[in-house]
Image: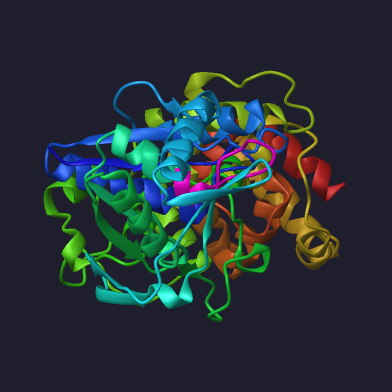
Amino acid sequence: MIKVRFAPSPTGYLHIGSARTALFNWLYAKRYGGKFILRIEDTDKVRSEKRFLEEILTDLKWLGIDWDGEPLYQSERFDIYRDAAEKLVKSGKGYREGEAYIFKVEKGRAIEVDDMIHGKITVNTDDIKDQVMIKSDGSPTYNFCCVIDDAYLEITHIIRGDDHVSNTPKQILFYEALGLKIPAFGHMPLIMGQDGAKLSKRHGGTAVEEYRMDGYLPQALVNYLLLLGWSPGGDREIISLDEAVKLFDINDMKGVQAKFDLQKLTWMNGEYIAKSEDSDLLPLLKDRLIAIPGVGKTPSKDLLLKVISLYKVRIKKLSEFAGMTDHFFSDTYSTEVKGVEKYISTKEGKDILREFSSRLEKLDDFSHAKTEGACRAMAEETKLKAGAIIHPTRVAVSGKTTGAGLFEMMEVIGKDEVIERMKKAAG
């Protein structure tokens, strides 16, 4: 059975690159009916924090990544690592330097790795110095405890980033020295910024938590991460996790660096939001609206669903929703000063608002079809362009120069409130 693992270190938030590593390992396990194991590399007792671990586990679950069994914690296995190091020293394969345990690297050997992504990689041991197994403070080194744990967990395939290529031959030496079965290795190209530099804040958020808080859907983020180094075939870009499980083949992964494009991710997120059911978006947007000044409490479900229906095709991130729709839920909604100056501050703009509001008052049916009809009739009678009526009305009603269709918006806000806002703006 195929067994893979993801081994986060709880010294910080889940990096977007680490999430991609977890995703491809999870996919590989699911594709072939294997197991995906979670190992917590918390050997750094000073920097490892419970809050980071909780955040990492939350983010993995949010992305739809589950794991088999209970996580393995390296901090609970120090005695096992020390015992293994002592056996190597006693067998003559290592030595002590004070409290530290050192592994002797045999020189003049060529170590070959048949990488699942890059092909054959050869490293000469002349380029590898003797390896520390246990540090003088009693903590194990990464390469040593990694091997012991992967063997204990019966990991068959290790899929990780290119930054670990230099670690692989060192770990193979430990596998051989301990008489352990060597797993298959695959090293994925790292995620870089559009400029080819290492991914950093200037390219966008680097932690999954930042994208979750900013209003990206997990389906969109997962979909985008899937395309960084792998393709479902053809020009297809939108793919679900369930579909990816059926199609994924690690041999199809590209051995070139993947470039992170925040603009494309945001576009993709907008596509997912627009295609989502209104009822699915409701719980995701509800709490965000409470933060709007003047709202105070959660708006009614009926009102929220109507507004979501109008705006889900206009937002790219959930975080944009509140700012675009505050005029539906509060009297203290934000106002674009330039819009007021351009469309309402003039005598013509105020006169148009007075005339149009007067016509709207006479309507018994305040549906979007009837209000639009009233607008078209006024435009024809006064020889005005419809836009000359629509623009000042939009600013008066919403405080904004753009948004959902004016007449659909007016129907949701309601007749009395719309007319009151128009009259107030007209002075």
Above or below, 196 against 424 in this view is below
Q: Is residue 217 visible?
A: no
Splitting the image into 4 quarters, where does residue 147 fall?
top left
Q: Is residue 78 magenta?
A: no
Residue 175 percent coordinates (x, y): 31, 50
Residue 275 percent coordinates (x, y): 33, 46
Front-lying residue, 9 or 197? 9
Q: Magenta span covers which residues?
A: 133-144
Residue 351 percent coordinates (x, y): 78, 57
Residue 352 percent coordinates (x, y): 72, 57
Front-lying residue, 378 or 68? 68
Q: Residue at x 12, y 48 (%)?
A: 246
For residue 379, side relative to residue 398 (left or right):
left
Front-lying residue, 314 or 397? 314
Q: Is residue 340 visible?
A: yes
Question: For the N terminus, which image quadrant?
Answer: top left
